Amino acid sequence: MLIGAGVSALILFIWQFLSWGPVLNIHGAQMAYTPQQEAILETLNSANLEEGTYFMPRVPEDATAEEMEAMGETSAGKPWAIVKYRKSFNPGSAMNFIRGFAADFVATLLLCWVLLKFAKLDLTSSLLTSISIGVIGYLTISYLNSVWFDGSTLPELIDAIVSWGLVGAWLGWWLPRGE
């Protein structure tokens, strides 16, 4: 189980690197360039904005129902944005890689646990179960976010099917060997 999860985590980690990086660049449109980036960043920085994620427009937490309704009416049809603001750019942090791999390892360890509950595990069951779990994650996180925040999630769907398909194929070959 540990070898299965370790190799699976490595498969996920490599796929994520390829998918988000310049090799495949599947997520390129989700990190588009704007020539106005310096002006936007300077505006955010000069506003002494605290680090965090902001949805605009939005009313304060203590807003009344009337204020919420008024904001909705005055904002309809106008621009909106989600801003994830950090005061310092730290590309390639070793801790990010460690946390990413650890998350992949825990996820694949949980998948191994599920697959080992099967009375008779074969390649097809492993592959379909793994892809199903990936698609469940996609539908309940990425897709639902796109429903409410109007975005394309095709890259995440590709990630869910390909990465979890690769993991399912590996585990479908590896795990039954220990029976």
Image (tube, rainbow, N blue to C red):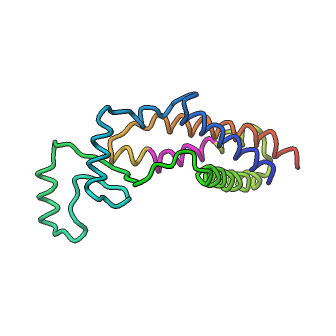
Q: Is residue 163 above or below residue 105?
A: above
Between residues 90 and 82, which one lies in front from this camera angle? 90
Q: Residue 9: x and y, percent?
A: 70, 47
Q: Is residue 141 rendered magenta in the image? A: yes
Q: Residue 58: x and y, percent?
A: 23, 57
Q: Is residue 37 above or below residue 43?
A: above
Between residues 127 and 99, which one lies in front from this camera angle? 99
Q: Residue 80: x and y, percent?
A: 24, 46
Q: Residue at position x 88%, y 49% from top?
A: 178
Side (left or right) of 30 relative to 39: right
Q: Is residue 165 rendered magenta in the image? A: no
Q: Residue 167: x and y, percent?
A: 69, 41
Q: Residue at position x 16%, y 67% from top?
A: 65
Q: Residue at position x 32%, y 41% from top?
A: 150
What range is drawn magenta here? 131-142
Between residues 31 and 145, which one lies in front from this camera angle? 31
